[in-house]
Image: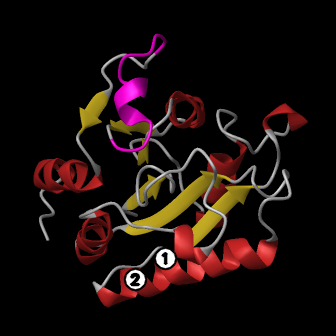
């Protein structure tokens, strides 16, 4: 199975220090939707894994999160892309749950539900916690410089041999060429 796991905020869409609280605040990063569509055309299943502490903070409710994801799915469909599923952690950073990245719980859940190993599966993120969760779950961490990625690229504790790309589209360009699956 060809699979790609993507963080949402800062990878697919613009991030916000004030959180993405509704569909009107969700703005795709240029080229990201088309990059997802290219992965799909090359036979990849694409899933999203995202921390959504705005839920725990009362800034967003489940209906609001659903509305954001409906917009994301609609805009992806307009360019021929599909995100198969979105896995999210609704907890605050201090809740000590197993699903909030950098913990690998959501990635383990993806592997369980899809019945696959995450070995060699790219997990594209823009923060150190994304990379840590990927490493812990056995996926291949990939950093993009969008969102918090430029700052993350200078952080200590990055995984050895980490691949860093300007954005999701740049990652997909290289990944599909090296996988021999250009689309």
Q: CA distance from mark 1 to mark 2?
A: 5 Å
Give the crowd class for mark 1: few <14, some 14-19, many >=20 residues within 10 Å. many
Q: Secondary structure at mark 1?
A: helix
Q: Residue at x 41, y 52 (%)?
A: 11
User: Which numbered tag is attached to residue 48?
Assistant: none
Q: Quadrant of the C terminus?
A: bottom left
Q: Position of residue 122 (x, y in %)?
A: 39, 46
Left or right, 10 with reference to 150 = right
User: Which numbered tag is attached to residue 75?
Assistant: 2
68 or 143: which is nearer to us? 68
Q: Position of residue 136 (x, y in %)?
A: 59, 30
Q: Which residue is mark 1?
A: 72
136 or 65: which is nearer to us? 65
Q: Residue at x 68, y 78 (%)?
A: 66
Q: Position of residue 108 (x, y in %)?
A: 66, 48
Q: Secondary structure at mark 2?
A: helix
The image quarter containing residue 104 is top right
Is residue 154 in the magenta section?
Answer: yes
Q: Residue at x 33, y 25 (%)?
A: 162
Circles 1, 2 touching at the beta carbon (< 8 Å)? yes
182 or 163: which is nearer to us? 163
- The residue lying furthest to the top in this view is 156
- Magenta segment, which residues? 146-157
Q: Residue at x 70, y 34 (%)?
A: 103
The image quarter containing residue 13 is bottom left
Q: Main secondary structure of the magenta part?
A: loop
Left or right, 183 with reference to 159 = left
Q: How is the image coloured?
A: secondary structure
Left or right, 85 with reference to 112 = left
Is residue 30 in the magenta section?
Answer: no
112 or 23: which is nearer to us? 23
Q: Quadrant of the N terminus?
A: bottom left
């Amino acid at each position: 199975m060809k699979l790609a796991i993507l963080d949402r905020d800062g990878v697919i869409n613009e991030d916000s220090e004030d959180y993405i609280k509704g569909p009107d605040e969700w703005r795709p990063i240029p080229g990201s939707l088309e990059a997802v569509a290219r992965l799909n055309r090359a036979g990849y299943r694409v899933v999203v894994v995202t921390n959504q502490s705005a839920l725990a903070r009362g800034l967003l409710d489940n209906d609001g999160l659903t509305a954001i994801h409906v917009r994301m799915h609609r805009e992806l469909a307009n360019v021929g892309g599909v995100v198969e599923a979105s896995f999210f952690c609704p907890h605050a950073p201090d809740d000590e749950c197993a699903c909030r990245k950098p913990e690998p719980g959501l990635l383990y859940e993806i592997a369980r539900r899809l019945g696959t190993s995450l070995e060699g599966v790219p997990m594209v993120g823009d923060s150190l916690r994304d990379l840590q969760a990927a490493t812990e779950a056995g996926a291949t961490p990939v950093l993009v410089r969008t969102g918090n990625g430029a700052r993350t690229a200078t952080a200590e504790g990055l995984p050895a041999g980490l691949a860093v790309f300007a954005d999701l589209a740049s990652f997909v360009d290289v990944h599909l060429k090296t996988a021999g699956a250009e689309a």
